């Protein structure tokens, strides 16, 4: 059960609740303690649901790794001044300046010598609550991205593909032409089914042909037989559902 950065950025995680065990896995509380070290926490209600997850170990390992990667905790960070802020106070401005120059010249390798500073292992923090979402809520989030009027981030695009099985049978009104072109490249049949106008069909055909899906420039179409068949079928469906709008759209795109 893969988690994704695009969901973590909204403080949500997905878990399929259709298959759950009847027994409670006490390791869920160990997982809670682990993610608290990364600044996150589950609600009491959600931790009960998580504890009955059928593939708990896979879920836990994937979530921890995703959170580490998202927060940068999977890397080793060496601060230039580990005794901050006291170390800064005790260092002259000239020494700070020289250290900065040498640090830059060394490509970030130089760390000024320093005495050992006592630091607390734990710091007060405001935890971010990770909300558990079900399949319907996941569909809603993915759908809002697909229908968004702005460009999708690379993480959102990857999440759409990761959870595509959840939305493959849904119908959307795709406003942003770049999103339609992206789907045409990655999920061609799905993209064709999302076409609501002749213009949309032209955009998809242009994307198939590696042409200008913005339709500013005419594209020399290079379509496979299967692509032609599916695009024509979609055009026939649009013509049958609204003949007047179809004829107007065809006339507007006659020179393309």
Image: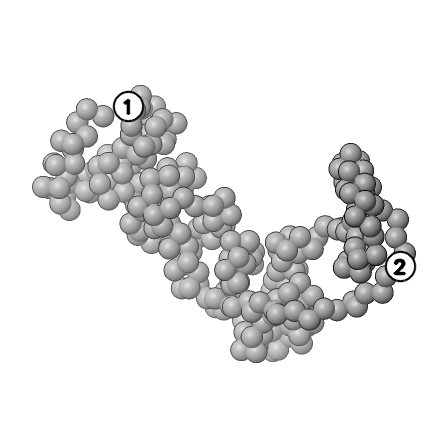
Q: What element carries label 1?
A: loop
Residue 181's x, y, as percent?
37, 37
Residue at 40%, 52% in the rendered image? 145
Q: Which of 236 and 49 is in front in this view?
A: 49
Q: Name the residue under label 2.
A: 116
Residue at 79%, 48% in the rendered image? 93
Characterize the local packing of mark 1: few (<14), some (14-19) or many (20 or more) Cα atoms within 10 angstroms: few
Mark number, residue 228: none
Q: Which residue lies most toward the left here?
A: 244
- The quarter holding residue 84 reads bottom right
Residue 229's x, y, as percent?
28, 33
Residue at 31%, 21% in the rendered image? 220
Q: Nearer the viewer, residue 138 or 51?
A: 138
Q: What element carries label 2?
A: loop
Q: Height in image: 119 above or below 49? A: above
Say if residue 50 shows up in the picture: no
Q: Which of 240 and 86 is in front in this view?
A: 86
Q: Is residue 53 left or right of residue 85?
A: left
Mark number, residue 218: 1
Say if residue 242 shows up in the picture: yes
């Amino acid at each position: 059960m893969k988690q994704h950065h695009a969901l973590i950025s909204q403080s949500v995680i997905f878990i399929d609740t259709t298959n759950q065990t009847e027994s409670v896995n006490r390791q869920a509380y160990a997982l809670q303690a682990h993610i608290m070290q990364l600044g996150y926490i589950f609600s009491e209600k959600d931790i009960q649901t998580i504890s009955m997850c059928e593939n708990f170990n896979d879920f836990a390992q994937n979530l921890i790794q995703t959170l580490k990667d998202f927060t940068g905790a999977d890397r080793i960070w060496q601060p230039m001044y580990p005794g901050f802020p006291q170390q800064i106070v005790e260092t002259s401005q000239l020494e700070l300046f020289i250290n900065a120059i040498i640090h830059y010249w060394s490509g970030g390798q130089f760390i000024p010598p320093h005495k050992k500073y006592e630091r607390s292992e734990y710091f007060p923090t405001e935890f971010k609550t990770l909300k558990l979402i079900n399949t319907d809520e996941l569909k809603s989030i993915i759908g809002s991205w697909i229908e968004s009027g702005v460009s999708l981030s690379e993480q959102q695009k990857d999440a759409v593909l990761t959870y595509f099985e959840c939305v493959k049978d849904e119908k959307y009104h795709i406003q942003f032409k770049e999103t339609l072109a992206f789907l045409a490249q990655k999920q061609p049949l799905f993209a064709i089914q999302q076409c609501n106008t002749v213009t949309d069909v032209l955009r998809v055909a242009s994307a198939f042909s590696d042409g200008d899906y913005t339709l500013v420039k005419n594209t020399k179409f290079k379509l496979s037989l299967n692509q032609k068949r599916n695009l024509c079928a979609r055009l026939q469906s649009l013509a049958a559902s609204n003949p007047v709008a179809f004829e107007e759209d065809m006339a507007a795109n006659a020179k393309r």
